[in-house]
Amino acid sequence: MNTFERLTRIREERGAGYLILIDPDKIAEEKLPGFVRQATEAGVDGFLVGGSLMMTNAFEKLLGLVKRNTTVPVVIFPGSLFQVSSLADAILFLVLISGRNPEHLIGNQVLAAPIIKKMGLESISTGYMLIGTGRATSAEFMSNTKPIPNHKPDIAVAHALAAELIGMKCLYLDAGSGADQPVSDEMIAAIRKRSSLPMIVGGGIRTTEEARRKVSAGASFVVTGTILEEDNDPTMIRQFAQTIHSAKVGA
Ligand code: 1GP
């Protein structure tokens, strides 16, 4: 079973899945193995590894540490061409569809594709949408794109449908790491009404109640990063996992 099939099975069996984003810049190397083991025991369904700005030169080393300390899927969430490695189970092959920057629509993909192919790394074609919910985020600044306004669900729906018709396998709605507010429930619900593509939702999710609402609106996977960097308490991870797995799934 490949990683996409494993993630699909999680969605089928648990309704929705819980993913933790590990930004290699934000966690100390010595804390990483213990954190990953605790999160795995606490019920996380997978790890995303990456960041829109990478100040460390130890991306691959840290990715290897994550991989060696867990049994759940480890998927690269690449912020740049430097974040490609065969140590992961798969990579989200992102196309930044909310933007109109050709480098993130096709330029970087052309540069990365031959390398990913040669590595034999599983690639999950993902329509990535940045949603603007407040102050500018690193992802917005670094990608040099304008996010979709959070109060414009119809624009997001049109982008999601375009991704589906192009043949992408997955959507990622991201308010950006550390965003003031998460993606609105209305936007998630509007997309879910029109598309059955798996939908990853992240950025600015700080409470279990917010995570529950995202699943009820139609998110297939909820991502948290910043909240655990601020307080990496395994009890909190367990609560997020339980809430996401028991939430009523939006249709
Ligand atoms: C960002 O969706 C992720 O790409 C996670 O966001 O760090 O705000 O939880 P946070």
Image (cartoon, rainbow, N blue to C red):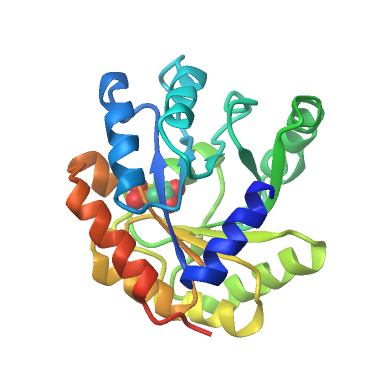
Question: Which residue is at 21% across, 47% downward?
Answer: 234
Number of marks: 0
Q: Is 223 drawn above or below residue 67 in the view shown?
A: below
Q: Is 173 drawn above or below residue 68 in the view shown?
A: below
Q: Does the image show residue 117?
A: yes
Residue 12 place in picture, x, y as percent: 56, 71
Residue 146 versus residue 190: which sits nearer the camera? 190
Q: Name, please, the residue furthest toward the top.
A: 57
Residue 93 found in image quarter: top right
Q: Is 158 drawn above or below residue 138 in the view shown?
A: below
Q: Is residue 174 left or right of residue 8?
A: left
Question: Which residue is at 39% across, 37% downward?
Answer: 22
Q: Does the image show residue 176?
A: no
Residue 177 place in picture, x, y as percent: 38, 47
Residue 166 place in picture, x, y as percent: 81, 62
Q: Is 61 drawn above or below residue 203 in the view shown?
A: above
Residue 197 place in picture, x, y as percent: 65, 69
Question: Which residue is at 57% across, 28% downward?
Answer: 83
Residue 6 found in image quarter: bottom right
Question: Which residue is at 48% across, 35% downward?
Answer: 50
Residue 104 found in image quarter: top right
Residue 158 versus residue 62: which sits nearer the camera? 62
Q: Is residue 56 left or right of residue 2?
A: left
